[in-house]
């Protein structure tokens, strides 16, 4: 009878698991398919694969293009070769990385937790997390970073007791060294794992194995540093992004990150309490796993402080979200004490409890999931930049060589992409600089030599604006709108779902 109950609960678990995964795949697929044009940060990556051959992609990024792991860029180059300038195709790597991450979670949970049913708690958090969804449909490498984190951790848990001889040590060293070519922050993941194996070899006095695992790792990592990182780090470009936006600057900042890691309205104090409880449990019961999980974030934090790699909340630290959630959920392993595990009825009741929590979280998070916007008849979930629509609007007008086209702060690289062949290159295209709405950045023509602020645009100039308020820069857009009212005559204005497309004459 007891065995029948256990089997029934097992069947219930797998049915719910399959259902949640299917819903997750449908949801992520819809987000990927229904999205508008590239935005600012995607543009430089597109330029990267457009302007360099597949071998040059491993080198440090040149000025005005953005870097990413070599394998991500190389695969994107192949996609670009077959499909050309296509938003959906170029975002495929991020999309499929997100799907693979979802599929990997149940297998990882079987290795990490005493109750495999914990995957029903982790999956809803993971599937509906806004940031994970966002980067699973952007032409950026961060979704691949998350998948690599989960995959490396899973493989480590599968093979950590099997790396015992020279051959396995060499293969492990090569694998660790190659991870950086797929994901930059993977280096933080594999360093503590490498230390784990070296420590084991030291205990068993296998001196040659230490060399065999370390040498290929150091060589491959050093080669990547010289080819892809040295020039970038030498320029100091990462310093301002890294040192002053570190999640470990204060407890308050870290607590905010914990809340941010989960989803929507999870209280930061509850998140912090779960995290501390998970840390304490791991310290008492699984210190090795505590080291493997916590060391990557600490190493990233230190490197971020010294300006070597960012450790900020919004994107690069994204790969650590699964790690943080896993630590928080480890507290459930307390329910796996021997007296419960040996009693089939008690064990089944605990499994049912976890399944019930998973169902509740799925319903809760599913009810608060992102709903699409309908913009000019097109569905989308995230709207950042209107460059694609802007160029379409301009093509319906007679844009004169002396007209000025003002592009918002996320638009520069993306606008250049959609302005095929730089059709408006003789037009004075100017770009709003970050963070001042009135400052101007331009590298396309000589206007930068004449003006540095929108107020310096000559009187009687004709200017096009596409003023959108669909992203989080409302104050800046309000300032620009006020400036237009005070300094121009509006010659024509078209209002649509995206914003106001305005043609003005400057009178002051």
Image (tube, rainbow, N blue to C red):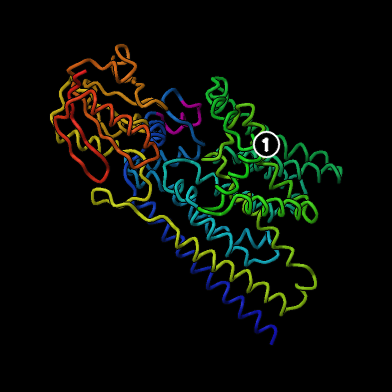
Locate the C terminus and report the quarter of the image it occupies.
Answer: top left
Q: Residue at x 67, y 66 (%)?
A: 115
Residue 215, image x, y percentages: 71, 34
Does residue 172 appear to the left or right of 225 in the view shown? right
Judging depth in this view, the residue of 352 and 445 nearest the camera is 352
Task: Name the main secondary structure of what is drawn in magenta.
Answer: loop
Q: Residue furthest bottom?
A: 1
Residue 38 within the magenta-colored segment of the rendering:
no
Q: From this view, report whether residue 506 is shown above or below residue 249.
A: above
Asked which quadrant contains residue 50, the reply is: top left
Residue 325, image x, y percentages: 62, 53
Residue 151 in view = no
Q: From this view, report whether residue 487 is shown above or below residue 273.
A: above
Give the magenta range.
52-61
Asked which quadrant contains residue 197, the reply is: top right
Judging depth in this view, the residue of 46 and 255 nearest the camera is 255
Residue 113 in view = yes
Residue 56 within the magenta-colored segment of the rendering:
yes
Q: Residue at x 42, y 59 (%)?
A: 27
Label 1 belongs to which residue? Answer: 299
Q: From this view, report whether residue 502 is shown above or below residue 15.
A: above
Provide the secondary structure element on which disc 1 rests: helix
Locate the N terminus and report the quarter of the image it occupies.
Answer: bottom right
Task: Classify mark 1: residues with Cα within 10 Å, few (<14), some (14-19) or many (20+).
Answer: some
Q: Residue at x 34, y 21 (%)?
A: 440
């Amino acid at each position: 009878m007891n065995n029948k109950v256990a089997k029934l609960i097992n069947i219930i678990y797998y049915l719910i698991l399959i259902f949640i995964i299917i819903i997750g795949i449908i949801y992520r697929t819809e987000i990927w398919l229904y999205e508008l044009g590239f935005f600012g940060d995607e543009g430089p990556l597109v330029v990267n694969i457009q302007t360099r051959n597949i071998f040059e992609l491993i080198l440090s990024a040149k000025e005005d293009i953005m870097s990413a792991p070599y394998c991500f860029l190389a695969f994107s180059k192949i996609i670009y070769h077959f499909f050309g300038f296509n938003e959906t195709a170029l975002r495929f790597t991020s999309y499929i990385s997100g799907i693979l991450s979802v599929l990997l979670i149940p297998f990882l949970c079987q290795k990490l937790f005493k109750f495999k049913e914990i995957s029903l708690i982790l999956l809803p958090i993971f599937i509906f997390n806004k940031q994970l969804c966002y980067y699973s449909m952007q032409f950026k490498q961060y979704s691949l970073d998350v998948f690599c984190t989960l995959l490396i951790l899973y493989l480590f848990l599968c093979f950590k007791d099997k790396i015992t001889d020279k051959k396995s040590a060499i293969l492990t060293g090569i694998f660790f060294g190659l991870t950086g070519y797929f994901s930059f922050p993977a280096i933080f993941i594999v360093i503590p794992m490498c230390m784990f194996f070296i420590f084991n070899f030291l205990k068993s006095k296998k001196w040659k194995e230490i060399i065999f695992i370390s040498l290929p790792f150091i060589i491959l990592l050093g080669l990547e540093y010289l080819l892809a990182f040295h020039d970038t780090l030498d320029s100091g470009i990462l310093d301002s992004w890294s040192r002053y936006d570190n999640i470990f600057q204060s407890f308050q900042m870290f607590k905010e990150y914990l809340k941010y890691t989960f989803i929507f309205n999870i209280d930061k104090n509850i998140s912090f309490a779960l995290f501390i409880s998970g840390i304490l449990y791991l310290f008492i019961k699984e210190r090795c796993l505590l080291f493997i999980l916590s060391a990557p974030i600490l190493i990233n934090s230190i490197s971020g402080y010294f300006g070597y790699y960012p450790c900020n909340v919004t994107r690069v630290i994204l790969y650590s979200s699964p790690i943080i959630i896993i630590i928080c959920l480890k507290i459930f392993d307390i329910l796996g004490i021997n007296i419960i595990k040996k009693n089939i009825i008690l064990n089944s009741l605990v499994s049912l409890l976890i399944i019930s929590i998973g169902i509740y979280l799925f319903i809760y998070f599913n009810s608060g999931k992102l709903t699409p916007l309908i913009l000019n008849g097109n569905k989308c979930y995230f709207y950042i930049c209107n460059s694609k629509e802007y160029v379409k609007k301009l093509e319906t007008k007679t844009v004169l060589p002396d007209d000025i086209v003002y592009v918002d702060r996320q638009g520069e690289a993306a606008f250049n992409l959609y302005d095929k062949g730089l059709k408006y290159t003789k037009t004075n295209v100017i770009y709003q600089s970050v963070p001042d709405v009135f400052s101007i950045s331009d590298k396309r023509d000589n206007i930068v030599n004449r003006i540095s602020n929108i107020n310096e645009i000559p009187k009687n100039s004709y200017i096009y604006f596409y003023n959108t308020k669909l992203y989080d820069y409302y104050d800046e857009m309000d300032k620009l709108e006020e400036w237009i009212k005070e300094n121009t005559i509006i010659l024509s204005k078209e209002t649509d779902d995206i914003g106001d497309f305005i043609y003005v004459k400057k009178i002051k």
